[in-house]
Image: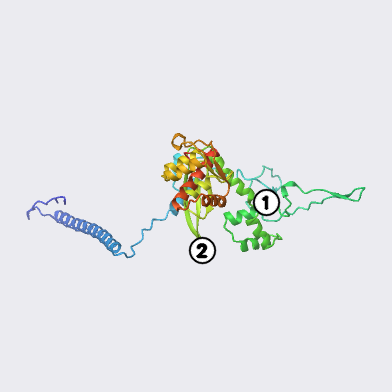
Amino acid sequence: MDSLKPQLPKISNEDRTPLVDVLLELLAWQQIQIDKLELLELLAWQQIQIDKLEQEILKLKGETTKPKIKPSKMDEYAAENDEENGDGRDKSKKNKGPKRSKTEYLKIDATFNIHPDNIPEGSTFKGYRDVVIQNIKFETFNTCYRLAQYQTADGSYVSGQLPDGLNGCHFGNDLISFILYQYHHQHVTQPLLLKQLQDLGVELSSGRLSQFITDGLDLFHDEKDQLLQAGLSVSQYIHTDDTGARHDGKNGYCTHIGNELFAWFSSTESKSRINFLSCLGQGSDHFYVLNAGALAYMEQQKLPSILLARLELEFEGEVVCSLPLADPADKMVRIETALDWEKWLDQQGIKTKRHRRIITEGALMGGLLAQGIPVTLS
């Protein structure tokens, strides 16, 4: 609802002085400006409504709509950095403090004392004014181990041994770490990395570089698997996620397991509960176990009672309903490989896809319970 505009009283000709006429003209001009602003606001509001309706029509027609582009946050990020680094220009006096030297905690590798070329007579030495220049040096560091050779009285030879840390490799650990860092963290391709190393003076072939990147990583894989088991041992809960991607014309998945304490990743070829249970068993003895917990899981998943009873009778198991789900005891069958497990299912005459899936999930669950992994995690 528009606000009521004040009305000017009628002014008689006797009261119309030159000053009154000027004021009346000024009021009329102000009213025109106000009307223009109101009209501009109305036009802007109408344009917004028109744009919304046009986008809605395009959406209903299935056509491409105008993308919503969020404003850039680079300026905000730069402003935050300026404040953190003390470079902000608009500072309040309350936040002003003593300026800290940016080179205060730098490691000094070389120090040079520089005196003036011409020192006038009578001058007194008052100490040094430090100027720190930051630089970086890339150079090779080659070590020659001279292994002493001795010939014994019986004609055989004894020789000095290389340090254990070299692991029989002719390239140092720092160089290998640099290669892995450049390739995995900085995403430097192998040809560029090889050219970089050769420019630095490292004698390295493309095949040897590829071996450093792809081979000899068992230690890292073992550490990754140990991370999973250590995380599961101290966790009350976990969450998982699978991200799919195409590789070499096939679908692949990256499975993540973790919580706020740890994060574990693995590349797999499927996205299923069987895959998840198999991932939980990595880093330890991975096997399929039919025990009380496995049979209880099968019952919960509505495995046909005839098939469930046959499994119980064949392996002389107790009644499933009376057994706790997390009981790792009473192992009845243990199979260590997926291929042997599939053969075992065939031998039992279990052909239905759903039945094979439920029994496999239960056996994997039984294996996890036998390892002591809490049932609440799986």
Horizontally, is 273 left or right of 20 in the view? right
Say whether marks 1 and 2 touch (CB < 8 Å). Answer: no
Counting other residues with Cα less than 10 Å from the Cα at mark 2, is it few (<14), some (14-19), or many (20 or more)?
few
Give the mark, 1 or 2, whose residue is nearer the N terminus: 1
Q: Which mark is residue 302?
A: none
Report the residue marked by disc 2.
249
Report the residue marked by disc 1.
174
**Towards the viewer: 132 or 339:** 339
Q: How far apart are marks 1 and 2 (CA)?
A: 37 Å
Is residue 131 something that shows in the picture? no
Query: Percent position (x, y) of residue 46?
Result: 23, 59
Query: Percent position (x, y) of residue 249?
Result: 51, 63
Query: Percent position (x, y) of residue 356?
Result: 47, 50
Asked if residue 284 is positioned above or below residue 250 in the image, the reply reads above
Which residue corresponds to the image point at 53% horizontal and 53% vertical from the top-left? Answer: 267
Horizontally, is 81 left or right of 149 in the view? left
Q: Which of marks 1 and 2 is in front?
A: 2
Horizontally, is 66 left or right of 241 in the view? left
Which residue corresponds to the image point at 51% horizontal and 53% vertical from the top-left? Answer: 254
**Towards the viewer: 203 or 225:** 225
* Colouring scheme applied when the structure was drawn: rainbow
Q: Is mark 1 on a helix, strand or loop?
A: helix
Q: What element carries label 2?
A: loop
Residue type indicated by callout 1: Asp
Is residue 335 something that shows in the picture? yes
- Give the farthest residue toward the right: 153
**Towards the viewer: 307 or 154:** 307
Counting other residues with Cα less than 10 Å from the Cα at mark 1, is it few (<14), some (14-19), or many (20 or more)?
few
Q: How many numbered marks are there?
A: 2
Residue type indicated by callout 2: Gly
